[in-house]
Image (cartoon, rainbow, N blue to C red):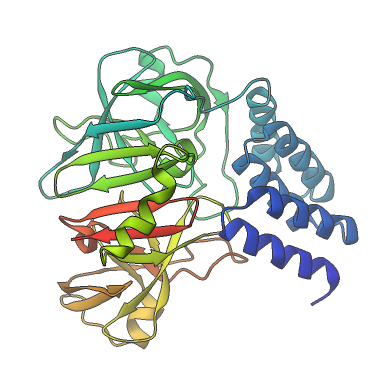
Amino acid sequence: PDAAEAHWGLGLVAIAENRPSAARDHGRRAYEISERPRFALGLAQWAAVDGDYAAAGDALATYLALAPEDPSAESYRRLQRFYRELGRAPVNVIDDRVTRLQLSFDLKPGDEIPYVPVRINGRESAYILFDTGAERNVIDRSYAESIGAGPIFPGGPLHGAYRQSPGGYAIVDSVAFGSVTVQRVPFAVGDFAALNLRGQGDYYIAAVINPALVFRDFLVILDLGHRRIELVRYGAGGETYVGRQTRLRKNAIPFHFDVNGVWPVVPVSLDGARALPFLVDTGASDVFIARETAAALMLDPARFVASAGGYSREDLRFLILDGALAEPWGIAVHGILGFPFFRGMRVAFDYRSMTMVLEN
């Protein structure tokens, strides 16, 4: 590849390893060598992951100057204005004195994904989905309006399979997880009724939150057997967890982020075949496999075996996934590893070592 593509490739490696600052350095170098729209758009995405929304807005301005005919140009202008607003002050702020948190969650029968009770802007408790497969934090429009969450900035469809909702954007003053409060939390805004997310009986879903966007300074543990979330800050014990657990012969699986910098991707073997990249999605109540992959491996939708990191789950079922899941220049994801694989397990995400630890 040419020098620009070489730096771009190094940027992809850096973001996969949760090194957004290094990814931005390589992205800037790629753009300096060759002013390609893709590089500017990637820089905007990686700056946002790195929490530098002012720089993300500048990169979007560069992209729009290079690609004014993009059908989504007006949507990106709106996102740029939102980034400018976010850049006025820090986001996802957690008191440095907070080192640990334990919080119970619910698993709704038949769905079995983590419904976490939180208090948004100090209001009555509402449920969010704790969802590693969410590319952005998303809040329900009607809920946001009902609690007076502040101005809702206009949105619009962006590139990518998961960013087509017209929605909008909002900044929530606070989200309280038990005794821990996260301040100034950015959200995309979605119509949950249209997405069939609101009608969950007693489980009214107010928002979807990806821990990689809010708790990246913590080891994040989902104990699906005991229905408990545990957070341990790095520097207060979180950094030693993987070493301690792997010495106890737990299953440690390296993971990488996709180009968006938030999706955890792990190698998964299906029916003993060569391992393929799968998105780990704690918000998915099923396992999904790309149509082409299922056909090539001649998988039985009603019964197959999935293996990851030395752990296997038999007699799984899967649903067919049609269409591209990720960006064309990101990891070629072949499916979604949802709750059935993790049922009853304790799943830890270590964003420092980029390791997922499974305990059965």
Query: Please, which residue is most extreme toward the left here?
Result: 109
Q: Is residue 29 above or below residue 278?
A: above
Q: Quadrant of the C terminus?
A: bottom left
The residue positioned 21% from the left and 39% from the top of the image is 228
Relative placement, left or right, of 289 versus 16 is left
Residue displayed at 64% across by 34% down: 79
Residue 70 visible within the image: no
Q: Position of residue 177 (x, y in %)?
A: 32, 26
Residue drawn at (47%, 39%) of the image = 235
Residue 212 to residue 314: above or below? above
- Where is residue 313? Give x, y as percent: 19, 71
Q: Is residue 232 visible?
A: yes
Residue 47 x/y as whole percent: 68, 42
Q: Is 217 left or right of 308, judged from the image as shown?
A: right
Q: Quadrant of residue 117?
A: top left
Quadrant holding the N terminus: bottom right
Q: Nearer the viewer, residue 167 or 251?
A: 251
- Badge count: 0
Q: Quadrant of residue 104?
A: top left
Q: Quadrant of residue 65?
A: top right
Instruction: Classify 312 as above or below 196.
Output: below
> Could you say where residue 306 lies in the image, as x and y percent from the top left?
26, 75
Q: Nearer the viewer, residue 164 or 113?
A: 113
